[in-house]
DNA sequence: CCTACCGATCGGTAGG
DNA sequence: CCTACCGATCGGTAGG
């Protein structure tokens, strides 16, 4: 009979006779307009922002709690440990990155062209959105804080990264076959993604090139305009 | 009269009447074959290795002390603070990287060719040596731990990085002028160095491509074989 | 460079 | 989700 509360708050383990008084259904915003399930989302966003700016080790769970108006012990009501919070940030980042990439590849609004040239452009542009879009702190954290994961967590994230990178290979293979890409496909993928990922270190949305211009520069840098017949 | 000891041990500040008994000149290895000036070098190397493997925040000064057989407080005899140790690692890394790059550009042993194509290859190959050569932990630390520097220290390192990157620009400009490089020079430099720097995340000297093969892949990826007349 | 130590901070928990 | 708290660790220092 207490299953609802238990499933919402897996670490609470309330005794059965201390069932919460809150009625079923969607909780009304009027109460204090907090204790939604949104508190977990708030914690994730604050953690991502702080982990990115200060690094995982330099961010205390107290910092994160304060950023969402909680007290020092409260984040542990939502996450079992600081590590679990880091992992959740990375997982959330990868899921939204994969969704964004899938949408970009499928989009025919901009152009019905499905040539590998256009597909690579979509992959690169979507990747820049993931790295530099407003509030997208999750993926930078994933890129720079893998060291702090347990080996089990790291393996799970590596699988998500493999899923993310999978669509790049056939596109690069097609460009290699048509002579637009001369370097080996596997090394090309690693070097290209590296060039993009490193932009986290220097790109500033508020000055310099736009994300479209950046994407153009990548296309010009990595691909040959003159196709070579084989 | 105590100037020798003071210049060797800037943080010791011994009273004048407690002058060390050790004779002048090169100290004999027989004593304990330690308290050379080499202890400082040992600390730097150990710190670089640990900072790279575990990160700056996750490495305690006790870890570093233990790695060279010292006790917990002793590193502070050689370095004023943990921050100063990090900065020294980065500065040492940049100085040797700049020296290696200068030697690579000047070398005419391998080939008297001074064309921008060959010069770019030398720059890339030298950069990979700096990143992946045996025991070269200093530059990876510099690349990934800048966040932990004070703003004054960060500015000093940024100047060294600017010195390091300066020779890339004229080479890339020449390649751009001859039609071998199509993307804008400034963005090209950022993207190319990013692709190289990111290899720290995935390159393993003991398997896969050699550094020469990696360099070949970069040349094939970034440059056009067909020059375009202007 | 060692010994002995201090103050501060941190992740995490019990109990409500 | 708050209150009150604990054990552990850490950077750094005094004095030799």
Image (cartoon, coloured by chain):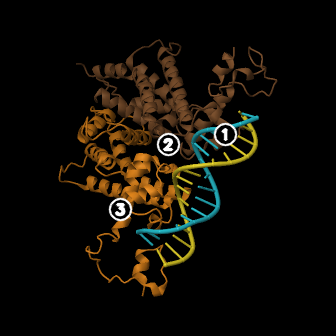
Chain colours: A orange, B brown, C yellow, D cyan
| Gap in angstroms between the C-alphas marked 3 and 1 | 41 Å
Residue that label 3 marks: A42
Q: Position of residue B145 (x, y in %)?
A: 48, 39
| Local SS, label 3 | helix
Residue A32 vertical position relative to residue A110 in the rendered view, above or below: below
The dot on residue A126 is: none
Residue bearing the label numbered 2: B202
Q: Residues within 10 Å of mark 2 (few under 14, many from 20)?
A: few
Could you tell me if the residues under marks 3 and 1 are in contact, i.e. CB atoms within 8 Å? no
Residue located 77% across and 16% down the image: B23
Q: Give the answer, above or below, for where A153 lies relative to B170.
A: below
Q: Are marks 2 and 3 on the same chain?
A: no
Q: Is residue B62 left or right of residue A67?
A: right
Which residue is denoted by mark 1 in the rendering? B73
For label 2, the SS is: helix
- Chain ID for label 2? B
Tell me which corner region of the image, top left, top right, bottom left or bottom right, holds residue B226.
top left
Comes first in the chain, label 2 or label 1: 1
Compare residues A84 and A29 and report the one nearer the observer. Answer: A29
Disc 2 versus disc 3: distance between alpha carbons?
A: 33 Å
How far from the left and from the top, in percent, is residue A74?
A: 45, 66
Q: Residue at x 48, y 54 (%)?
A: A60
């Amino acid at each position: 009979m207490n299953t609802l509360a238990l499933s919402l708050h897996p670490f609470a383990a309330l005794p059965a006779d201390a069932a919460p008084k809150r009625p079923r259904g969607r909780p009304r915003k009027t109460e204090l307009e907090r204790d939604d399930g949104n508190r977990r989302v708030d914690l994730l966003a604050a953690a991502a922002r702080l982990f990115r700016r200060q690094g995982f080790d330099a961010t205390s769970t107290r910092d994160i709690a304060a950023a969402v108006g909680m007290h020092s012990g409260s984040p542990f009501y939502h996450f079992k440990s600081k590590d679990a919070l880091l992992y959740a940030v990375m997982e959330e980042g990868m899921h939204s990155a994969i969704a964004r990439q899938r949408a970009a590849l499928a989009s025919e609004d901009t152009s019905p062209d499905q040539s590998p040239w256009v597909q690579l452009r979509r992959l690169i542009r979507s990747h820049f959105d993931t790295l530099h879009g407003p509030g997208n702190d999750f993926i930078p954290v994933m890129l720079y804080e893998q060291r702090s994961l347990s080996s089990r967590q790291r393996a799970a994230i590596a699988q998500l990264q493999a899923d993310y990178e999978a669509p790049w290979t056939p596109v690069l293979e097609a460009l290699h076959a048509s002579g637009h890409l001369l370097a080996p496909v596997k090394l090309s993928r690693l070097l290209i993604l590296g060039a993009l990922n490193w932009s986290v270190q220097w790109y500033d949305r508020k000055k310099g090139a736009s994300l479209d211009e950046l994407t153009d520069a990548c296309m010009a840098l990595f691909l040959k305009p003159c196709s070579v017949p084989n």
